[in-house]
Amino acid sequence: YDFSFLVGYDCIHNMEKWENYEKLLNEVSFVVFTPTPALLSDKIKDYKHLTIKTMSLPPYRSTTIRESYATGIKPHGVPVEIEEYIDA
């Protein structure tokens, strides 16, 4: 089997906080989803097991939802199922 970590561009920028992140980046395959590769640092782009996939951003990103809830504001337009899951 061939496994890969699937991450968004916002997550990959915090990798330096991960334990042994350089070992992970050199030994494990990562697929990074981003609206544009320009958002990724050159350092990140140099890792050999990194695949960059360009895609449009979904209307509801987990980072945006978490940030809104952290400030006590429920984001407008989030599907009811997601709100119920968060409130549970």
Image (cartoon, rainbow, N blue to C red):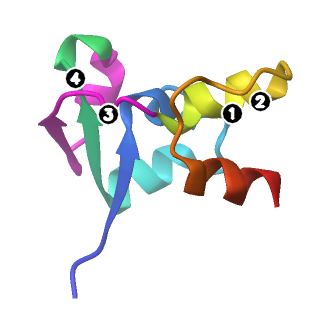
- Whole-Å distance between the Cαs marked 4 and 3? 10 Å
- Whole-Å distance between the Cαs marked 1 and 4? 20 Å
**Residues marked 1 and 3 touching at CB (< 8 Å):** no
* 4 or 3: tag closer to the N-terminus: 4
* 1 or 4: tag closer to the N-terminus: 4
- Whole-Å distance between the Cαs marked 2 and 4? 24 Å
Tell me which amino acid carries mark 1: Arg
Would you name the residue on which mark 4 appears? 35
User: What is the magenta range?
Assistant: 40-60
The quadrant holding residue 15 is top right
Q: Position of residue 61 (x, y in %)?
A: 47, 34
Q: Are there few (<14), some (14-19), or many (20+) residues within 10 Å of tag 2? A: few
Tell me which amino acid carries mark 4: Pro
**Residues marked 2 and 4 touching at CB (< 8 Å):** no
**Residues marked 1 and 2 touching at CB (< 8 Å):** yes
- Whole-Å distance between the Cαs marked 2 and 3? 18 Å
The residue depicted at 73 percent of the width and 52 percent of the height is 86
